[in-house]
Amino acid sequence: MSSIVRPYGDTTGDGMVQLSFTLPVAHDKRAEGAAAQLAAKMGLDNAMVVHSKAIGTRHTFFVVYGAARHLVNLDEVEVVERDYPLLSPKEVNEVVKERLGRKLCVVGACIGTDAHTVGIDAILNIKGVAGEKGLECYRELRVVNLGAQVAVPDLVNRAIDEEADAVLVSQVVTQRDAHLHNTREMAAAFREALPPGRRPLLVVGGPRFDERASAELGVDRVFSRGTTPGDVASYLVHRLVASQKEIPA
């Protein structure tokens, strides 16, 4: 199988893609022409505006369909692969109980002005996500969910008070890279407050994070969209508990 691929739309290799964007122009024919021109400058051949809708009086939303000129070399794609075994809740509980000898403490929060708790709740709450229960249902994990809009100093102090093994932070708001600024601020605060041997594992997640950016952001792990409670629980066990010997694969 070739490692060089091109987008597939109507027929194999036709390169057809669909993209959406908003322009700060009123909804009229001129606006549609501007959208088609932008798509052409982005490298789409025979770009067609297949949908447009006014957003107020000065903005227009577009969906454009056209053929991309570019190819993708799969051999050059860089991603973060899961480098630890995925465990069931039962296996997580057994490993923590056997090797840690106490409950593993996890403190979670949305920091800064971010009020979107859907991500942190999906991982922590018993209800979980997509039929998979959150970390609160793991009997050997002690979960402290601080909720939304938690100030970084408050998070650090609470993590110290709880003697947290791991801190999970969800960031959904990304305007002006707020998720990146907040994450760097949090990492710096923990580095200042605790020596390396006493710092909790720092884990961040959200739909706009790049999973390759953990070192740049000063955290131990970055999770992006599609992450499940099982992914997070297995990672915590791998990093905090299971390094002593092999665990089930």
Image: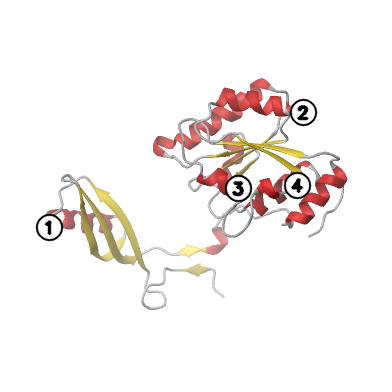
Residue appearing at x 55%, y 36% in the figure: 147
Task: Please state if 84 lies on the left or on the right of 222 as rendered.
Answer: right
- Does 218 appear above or below 50? above
Residue 90 found in image quarter: bottom right
Q: Residue at x 45, y 31 (%)?
A: 113
Quadrant containing the C terminus in the rendered view: bottom right
Q: CA distance from mark 1 to mark 2?
A: 63 Å
Residue 121: x and y in percent read 56, 45
Disc 3 residue crowd, few under 14, some 14–19, many 20+, Cα 10 Å: many
What amino acid is found at the position of numbered circle 4 in the picture? Answer: Arg
Reading the image, the residue beneath label 1 is: 29
Question: Which of pointers 3 and 2 indicates the residue nearer the eye?
Answer: 3
The CA distance from mark 1 to mark 3 is 46 Å
The residue wearing badge 3 is 123
Labels 1 and 4 touching (C-beta < 8 A): no
Disc nearest the viewer among 3 and 4? 4
Position of the N terminus by quadrant: bottom right
Circle 2 packing at 10 Å, graded few (<14), some (14-19), many (20+), is few
